[in-house]
């Protein structure tokens, strides 16, 4: 499923996907519509432009994951939208690509997202590193154990991703397997997303938004 | 002193002066009516009252037009008041004044003082008050505590009203600047949205579709990609840097280096540094990137990573170029060519930070700048 408000882009991306042998089950230019048709279209991967005219990328991702648990979201966005990219990742998107990426890079990202891998750009790695450090610094002492932390190895891997090394290069440099590098990257995202869900739940309970039964 | 041309904030002040002018005029008329029998030359009261009433109407009419509030009007206003004051000894008579009968201008003489103060601030108000006060003193044979108090109050009024008028003018200017800035920002955002939705998408599209092709078409696609990145940086830039502020966001400076071949990774939150420090780090990163472009060729890519942790800012610049052969930097220094290493190390050392350059042939080069910042 392709969600992008620009028709030319939408068609171009859909055509590239179709040519590469993917089945494009739906295309739309509106986030609300994407959430609405997702259950019927039942895509494995959603290619999502973060800047939609109607609702925010975070809302789309939450809606998609609620409608179709397990769906993979690959975000496309322009550079210079740091906070929204980070929010989208915390909301559950597992892949991020800048719009200027070439078609090969794009198809590779779709393939890996479909396989359940986290797709990082150096920019996203920098954002995620920054977010962990922000959480560590501003950590409320009472919830120390709830604040997600990176292991030294995960920090090392993320820094290398942010400096533009491929997983293969990282594996070679740290003498790890390719799979292990991938797992480390994935864990960094997983912990952030879990923390985000915990925070949301806590917020909901504090505000009395949960149902008591 | 023509720094408040429109002065909408001053409109209430001018209106207040007009009201005071008529109120004091009524007071003067009443005083004259009561005391005219004791005047030395009662006949003089007729032209005096005509002038007071006539000038009150004329001045109110003229001051209502901002363009007329210049020196000729202010001067005439003051002159009319002085003439009335100086005519008082003859019309009222010195002995009558000495017996406590008010002069022809009484409270009315404060009008030009207030007008001067509103038009030009404290200093003008004080000058007018002193001039009117001096004239008032000369027509009195004896100074009494009451008359002194009146003069002091007039001086106080001139200064205080002038101060308020100046404050009003300044607030108005500040408000106007804020409104202009907001309008400019909103317009810029509107343009950015428009460009984002149209031109950028098409340029990115051209780059994308052309990437398959060979020769000239591929070159066009590449150019479209470069323009897309440049335009995006232009319209998507962070809010304009506050030049005067003591701290700047290092991310904004590093963002300036982003291009099709340079990727910038940074936290989502600002990395605030003193302006001079941030500029030096920016210059050091710029030197490192220049070096990448010079030695690596056009297809070498570079990555900049900005991190801040526990009071330390780290900026890494990595490229995938040919790398620097071992000993090359030392050799260059020995030959007296100070180049990139010197420029980068020098700048960062001056800030009290450290630089590490790691490189191996075929593995690119990595320059890491570390600087402790006090939080």
Image (spheres, coloured by chain):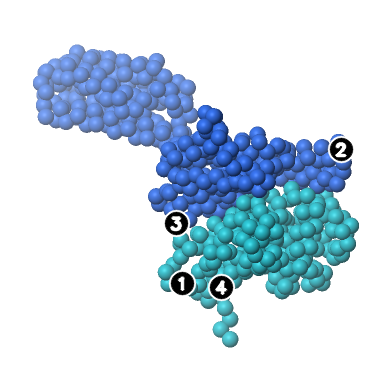
Chain colours: A cyan, B blue
- Residue at the location (37% across, 35% down)? B167
Q: Quadrant of the N terminus of chain B?
A: top left
Dot 3 surroundings within 10 Å: few (below 14), some, or many (20 or more)? Answer: few
Label 3 with label 1: CB-CB less than 8 Å: no
Which one is nearer the viewer's eye here, B127 or B174? B174
Vertical position of residue B318 compared to residue A4: above or below: above
What number is the disc on residue A143? 1
Q: Position of residue A35 (x, y in %)?
A: 74, 67
Q: From this viewpoint, is residue A10 visible? A: no
Which one is nearer the viewer's eye here, A168 or B373? A168
Q: Earlier in the sequence, mark 4 or mark 1?
A: 1
Residue ID for mark 4: A198
Q: Position of residue B17 (x, y in %)?
A: 36, 31
- Residue at the location (73% across, 41% down)? B299
Element type where label 4 sits in the image: helix
Vertical position of residue A148 compared to residue B196: above or below: below
Q: Position of residue B344 (x, y in %)?
A: 52, 38
What number is the disc on residue B310? 3
Element type where label 1 sits in the image: helix
What number is the disc on residue A95? none
Residue ID for mark 2: B215
Q: Viewer-nearest of labels 3 and 1? A: 3
Q: Position of residue A148 (x, y in %)?
A: 53, 68
């Amino acid at each position: 499923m392709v969600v992008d408000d620009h028709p030319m882009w939408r068609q171009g991306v859909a055509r590239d996907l179709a040519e590469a042998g993917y089945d494009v089950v739906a295309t739309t230019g509106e986030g609300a519509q994407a959430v609405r048709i997702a259950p019927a279209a039942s895509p494995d991967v959603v290619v999502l432009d973060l800047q939609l005219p109607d609702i925010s990328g975070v809302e789309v991702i939450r809606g998609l994951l609620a409608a179709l648990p397990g769906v993979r979201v690959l975000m496309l966005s322009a550079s210079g939208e740091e906070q929204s990219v980070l929010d989208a990742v915390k909301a559950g998107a597992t892949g991020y690509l800048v719009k200027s990426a070439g078609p090969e890079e794009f198809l590779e990202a779709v393939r890996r997202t479909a396989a359940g891998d986290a797709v990082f750009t150096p920019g996203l790695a920098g954002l995620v590193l920054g977010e962990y450090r922000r959480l560590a610094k501003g950590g409320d002492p009472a919830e120390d154990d709830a604040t997600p932390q990176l292991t030294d190895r995960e920090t090392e891997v993320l820094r290398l991703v942010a400096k533009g090394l491929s997983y293969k290069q990282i594996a070679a440099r740290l003498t790890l397997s390719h799979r292990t590098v991938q797992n480390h990257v994935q864990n960094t995202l997983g912990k952030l997303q879990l923390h985000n869900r915990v925070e949301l739940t806590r917020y909901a309970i504090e505000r009395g938004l949960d149902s008591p039964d | 002193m023509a720094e408040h041309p429109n002065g909408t904030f001053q409109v209430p002040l001018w209106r207040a002066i007009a009201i005071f002018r008529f109120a004091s005029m009524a007071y003067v008329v009443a005083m004259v009516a009561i005391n005219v029998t004791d005047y030395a030359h009662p006949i003089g009261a007729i032209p005096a009252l005509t002038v007071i009433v006539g000038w009150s109407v004329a001045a109110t009419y003229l001051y209502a037009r901002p363009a007329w509030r210049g020196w000729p009007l202010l001067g005439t206003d003051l002159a009319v008041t002085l003439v009335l004051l100086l005519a008082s000894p003859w019309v009222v008579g010195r002995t009558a004044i000495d017996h406590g009968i008010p002069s022809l201008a009484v409270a009315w003489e404060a009008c030009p003082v207030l007008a001067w103060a509103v038009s030009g601030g404290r200093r003008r108000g004080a000058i007018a008050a002193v001039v009117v006060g001096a004239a008032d003193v000369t027509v009195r044979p004896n100074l009494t505590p009451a008359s002194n108090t009146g003069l002091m109050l007039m001086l106080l009024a001139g200064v205080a009203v002038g101060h308020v008028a100046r404050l009003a003018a300044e607030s108005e200017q500040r408000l106007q600047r804020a409104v202009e800035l907001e309008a400019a920002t909103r317009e810029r955002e509107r343009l950015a949205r428009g460009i984002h939705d149209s031109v950028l998408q098409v340029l990115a599209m051209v780059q994308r579709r052309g990437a398959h092709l060979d020769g000239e078409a591929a070159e066009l696609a590449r150019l479209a990609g470069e323009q897309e990145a440049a335009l995006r940086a232009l319209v998507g830039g962070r809010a304009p840097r506050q030049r005067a502020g003591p701290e700047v966001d290092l991310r904004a400076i590093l963002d300036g280096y982003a291009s099709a071949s340079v990727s910038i990774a940074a936290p989502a939150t600002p990395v605030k540094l003193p302006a001079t420090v941030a500029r030096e780090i920016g210059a050091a990163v710029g030197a490192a990137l220049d070096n990448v472009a010079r030695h690596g060729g056009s297809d070498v890519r570079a990555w900049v990573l900005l991190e801040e942790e526990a009071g330390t800012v780290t900026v890494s610049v990595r490229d995938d170029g040919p790398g620097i052969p071992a000993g090359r930097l030392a050799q260059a220094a020995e030959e007296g060519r100070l180049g990139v290493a010197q420029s980068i190390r020098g700048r960062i050392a001056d800030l009290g930070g450290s630089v590490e350059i790691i490189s191996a042939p075929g593995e690119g080069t990595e320059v890491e700048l570390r600087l402790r910042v006090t939080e």
